[in-house]
Amino acid sequence: MSRRRPTRIREGDDMTDIGDGTDADDWTQTKTMEKPADQLQLSEQDLKEEFTRILTANNPHAPQNIVRYSFKEKQYKQTSSVDQLAIHFSLDGNMLHRDSDEAKRQKGKLGLPEAASEPAISESGEGAAEEAEGEKQETTEERADDAATPAPTEKRKLTNQFNYSERASQTYNNPYRERGTATEPPPRATYSGNVTQWEIFDAYSEDFEKQEKSKEKKVVPGRKEEDKSRKKLTITETQSDDISRVSVASKIVERMVNQNTYDDVAQDFRYWEDVSDDYREQEGTLLPLWRFAHDKAKKLAVTSICWNPKYNDLFAASFGSYDFMKQGTGLILFHSLKNPSYPELVYETDSGVMCLDVHPEHPYQIAAGFYDGSVAVFNAVEKKDGPLHRCTAKNGKHTDPVWQVRWQKDDSDNNMNFFSISSDGRIVHWTIVKNEMIYQDVIKLVIPDVSAEGPDGIKVPTLGCGTAFDFHKQKDYLFLVGSEEGKVHVCSKAYTSHFIDSIDAHNMAVYKVAWNYYHSKLFITCSADWNVKIWEMSNKIDNKDNSETSTRKALFSFDLNNSVGDVAWAPYSSTVFAAVTADGKVYVYDLNVNKYEPICEQMVAQKKKTKLTHIEFNPIHPIIIVGDDRGNVTSLKLSPNLRKVPKEKKGQPPMDAAARQQFELNKLEKILSMVRESTEANAS
């Protein structure tokens, strides 16, 4: 490592001469200016030109295009003022001022003596300073004496009573709780908005204007009694608002209490699976869950059950009497699985309610048919004890009990409409136009070759008694009609004068007809002759041919040894259906597992001589609800063997609705093809 000799500067040397020869080369280093080839060549005047540069306190990272929503103007507006503060470092200390309240409380808690206040130093006199120094010496001597003899520490009482808190009144931090009390967290949503003084002022002013408008009333002179009555109405309205708020809160509390009371049933509804199904492939069981009852429905029979299409835990049930000699009032109850102790809505009627149906698109609209032949429409949203619309003898009322009603799609004018069937042999189409119901007879169940003689020898056609009907799932113009004579008629809205086809299905009254959810030509019937039959519609009828060439023999026939009150297809499988009988049993069949015997036969009625009247599958959950003639509705959960669904293959995406529909259709077609081959072989 080379070292340079330090230079000595002589006096008077201005360091201008650096020497001659090699000494100058050693001390100086030649610098060559390298310029890039694309550098801009500027003149001396341009180089000497000055440019001003301004330093600002703006934050370069602050956003410049913030847009926020203005609730006052109801549009998005760009904010001009942006906060330019940039914090590079922040450190929060834990030091307290010794004269603060918090410091005094901590000193009192730890038992530390308070620091002596510093004496004031006056600028004018030196004597005061000397006295202060003397006092300091005395205090130091006293502190030394105090240190030698420690004084007893006294507990100081806090003077501020508002900051005092008793430990016994505080709750435990994170106490242990039972798992049964744990609930799912409520759903959360992120919401943002701006609140300013003028927005608050505008909101208050609008509310004040509304209150002023509500208070403004036309005062007629000389009618003080009317004014008093109006004041009473306003008072009752405010009281009703308060009562409605209390009712909502009480419903929530009631559901919480019921959830804890029926916690074991709720756990079974969610998680129970019968393990024994793994050891028996062709058998299943039903687990009883909740039982729904009402005091006013004890002596009435469940005449109809319908699930709400929007709320899967809510169903409606109608109550009446099938006995002609025991007719009285009726009921419509709305029960929820979340509150099995008491119904959500109660409608009392003058006549027995024999059927009802909930609108598929407007779940608050309920159509009902009564034993006296009238039909009515209820609105569950409007707080009204009676129906919104009801027919009378002047506008098409039936003369016999109405056994079934069914909503249809809205017409071209967006008017709601539904159909009804009665024992008087009429199928009526009802349309709700504004505040009235307009009726139109669709078809009459005329019995061919049977007529009665009227006055003057006129022959009057004899009408059959309609008991049930069902509309096609894809073709709404096609529908089936069951009668008390045991016949099933295939009808169309386009042909109102005659039937497309008529089938001698049963020997006694038909109680239910229902199309299959997946197969467009398959339907099921049940009757009082103890039989459940499955039929297939022929292709000629499907093509609107009026020839009577449909299948006269049922594809499947099942004898249940008692009167069958109701039958229903399962919405999750094309081969599963369930039926209820008058001896209190529920039968569940799966044609894919066993075409001859039920895979589940279970007694559901709790008391002897209890008849089961209706059954319905839940569209989402694996449960069914069953009604009896004692006013009770029982919910039952299906075991895994009763609700088999196609298994998803590994590595393949789950099936969509169309693929699932095709799978169920193919599964049912395989079974039907085998039955067709056997029937053709027997016929030959």
Image (spheres, rainbow, N blue to C red):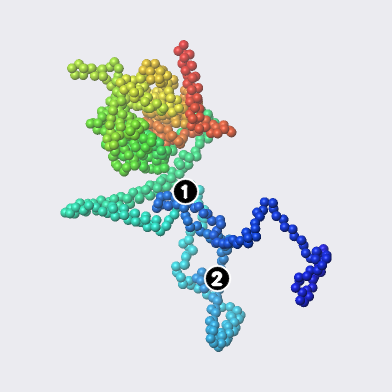
- Which residue bears the numbered disc 1? 189
Residue at horizontal 47%, vertical 47%? 187
Instruction: Estimate how packed mark 2 is, as few (under 14), some (14 to 19) or many (20 or more) residues with alpha carbons within 10 Å.
Output: few
Residue 362: % across, % down: 37, 37
- Which residue bears the numbered disc 2? 110
In the rendered picture of this protein, how many numbered marks are placed on residues? 2
Q: Quadrant of the N terminus?
A: bottom right
Q: Is residue 16 left or right of residue 382?
A: right
Q: Nearer the viewer, residue 560 or 80?
A: 80
What amino acid type is highlighted by mark number 2? Answer: Leu
Residue 445: % across, % down: 30, 22
Instruction: Estimate how packed mark 1 is, as few (under 14), some (14 to 19) or many (20 or more) residues with alpha carbons within 10 Å.
Output: few
Q: Residue furthest top?
A: 684
Q: Is residue 658 left or right of residue 627?
A: right
Marks 2 and 1, the one that precedes in the sequence: 2
Residue 366: % across, % down: 34, 36
The reply to whether residue 444 is visible in this rendering is yes
What amino acid type is highlighted by mark number 1? Answer: Ala
Q: Residue furthest left?
A: 222
Residue at horizontal 28%, vertical 52%? 214
The reply to whether residue 109 is visible in this rendering is no
Q: Secondary structure at mark 1?
A: loop
